[in-house]
Image: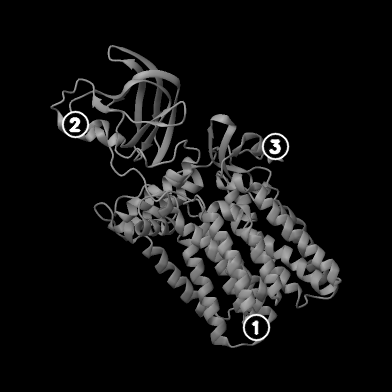
Amino acid sequence: MEKIRKLEIASVSALTILFLVLALLNIGSLSMPSSCWAPGSISGEEEVQIIFDFDHVQQVKAVYIFLGDEKQTKFGVYGGEPGEWRLLSSYDNTHYCSWEKINLGNTSTRFLKFAFDASESTGKIGEVLAISGEDKIIVPIRVYAEGESDSDSTSGEDIERLIDEQDIIEIPLVQSYKYGTYFDEMYFVRTAWEHLNLEEPYEWTHPPLGKLIIAGGIACFGMNPFGWRILGVLAAAVMIPVMFLFGKRMFKSAMAGLFAAFLLTFDFAHFALSRLATGEIYIALFSLMMFYFFFDYARIVSDGEGEKKAEKRLFISVICFGFWFATKWTAAFGLAAILILLLISNLRNKRPFYSNYKIILAGLFVSAAIYIAAYIPYMLSGTGHGLWDVFMKQVGMFGYHAWSVVGATHPFSSPWWSWPLMLKTLWLYSNTVNGGTVSTIVLMGNPTIWWGGIPALIVIAAKFLRGAVRAGVQEQDYLCLFILIPFILLWLPYALITRTLFIYHFVPAVPFMILAITYWMNELQQKASKGKFIAGITVILILTAVLFCLFYPVISGYPIAFEYKESLRWLEGWIF
């Protein structure tokens, strides 16, 4: 096996560090409101009315309110003064650890009254910010419950929690995702926190490992956006050197490895998912590692480097499947690809088709142990759960995906066949402020990779079939199978799934589009002139990087002009 040279280490390290810098920029705050108040804390009242006194008449444009838990928050906002209130706006919703904006239309008032229905509004409120027309925080001189006497200090101290952390965020709040949850984070972060505190988990429709990893970040850095996202960024960063090793060993070329790692570094979906605290980025990592270690197994067997060495790679590959399966059941598609490739490898090397079955079984046994271990926090939660409860969770999970969500709709769902074409994007987040400035986050692929990967895969498939018909399968043609079979089995099975699907389901297949493009760059290097090769690889690398820079604001949430955002909507289905 060729050693990794210092220049290669430096190059991959540079790509990884660059990715980390870009992904960690504005990833999220290290702090959140920590003191909360709930309308039900004032007992014996059907309606709780909280009054903000600003000392004199102010122009109040909006109110930001931080919702600290998942329970319903319902209230009306009134302006004017005691005895002469007028309704300005109403709010009734449920969110988890997020800032919600309530527009008040530049109202001139000295007082704001928040009227809560104590029976329906049971959620915890971490902070309330009143915003002036100049986007400044208006700090009230006093916050009190209507009808409260000055001597009633107990409820007064509780109510003060609504304004005791006024400097927790930056105003204007353009990038609100930095200070709270967005998209499906509200489910995964909530469940991660519950696992961490051994409470009954809310999200159970997927196995727990993804939520447990998020909980690990929270345990290290606190219950804040940075804490629940940081491990996702690190997981995405680890994929870059793994991609380098995959490309290098598949094509026996360090340049091919660097080319593949470069494309992954600047893929939009890889970047956006790294900054979203859900399980998808961990699935992408486990998938890539599973296929990398399996390919290394097949390479070692083919090169005759030693049976024990090969068995270790195969065992690690199956364990990676276990981590993937403990995150999401879609790992079954990857395992099917591995078993087919194992059969092909055994036939290719004239080994019995059942060769290494003991290693496979041992790996599956460890995978089962990983899966069960992922449920230990659940078994310790609440009043405790046994293995039968864990089994019933699996039955419920299957029923949910097989029947409960069939026929459900979502405005940003997309059919499986449209994913490589990127006909429809997944809009994760949006926030607009005055002056036409918008912060938005969209999940989509880099057109160079996703669109360029389609013809690369088609030509690879045609090359393999042509070679198989004319002269039998040759050595180089096996590489085609190691690209095509994983890609097909990580994508086409979704055609059989009737539940709502999203473009992020396609992300584990993207590395094989990258390898398909790398395959042809490697062929170009070997068969074309040096000038054509340099021109071809330069065009692809520059186009990939330029498109990443061009789309960076809409995949990162960086504030931009509305007109700039609209100029990037090249297709009708690109909504963000």
Element under disc 1: loop
- Quarter holding the C terminus is top right
Lower sequence index among marks 1 and 3: 1
On the image, the x and y values in percent for residue 317 come to 53, 72
For residue 119, side relative to residue 509 (left or right): left
* Measured Cα–Cα span from mark 2 to mark 3: 53 Å
* Measured Cα–Cα span from mark 1 to mark 3: 48 Å
Lower sequence index among marks 2 and 1: 1
State yes or no: discs 2 and 1 in contact (Cβ < 8 Å). no
* Measured Cα–Cα span from mark 2 to mark 1: 71 Å
On the image, the x and y values in percent for residue 12 come to 61, 69
- Outermost residue on the top side: it is 84
* Residue 331 visible in this rendered orientation of the protein: no
Residue 2 numbered mark, or none: 1
On the image, the x and y values in percent for residue 369 come to 40, 68
Front tag of 2 and 1: 2
Q: Residue at x 38, y 59 (%)?
A: 216
Q: Residue at x 51, y 55 (%)?
A: 24
* Residue 309 visible in this rendered orientation of the protein: yes
Q: Amino acid at mark 1?
A: Glu
Residue 155 numbered mark, or none: 2
Vertically, is 390 above or below 401? below
Q: Amino acid at mark 3?
A: Glu
Q: Which residue is mark 3?
A: 572
- Quarter holding the N terminus is bottom right
On the image, the x and y values in percent for residue 264 come to 63, 61
Q: Amino acid at mark 2?
A: Ser
Vertically, is 348 above or below 238? below
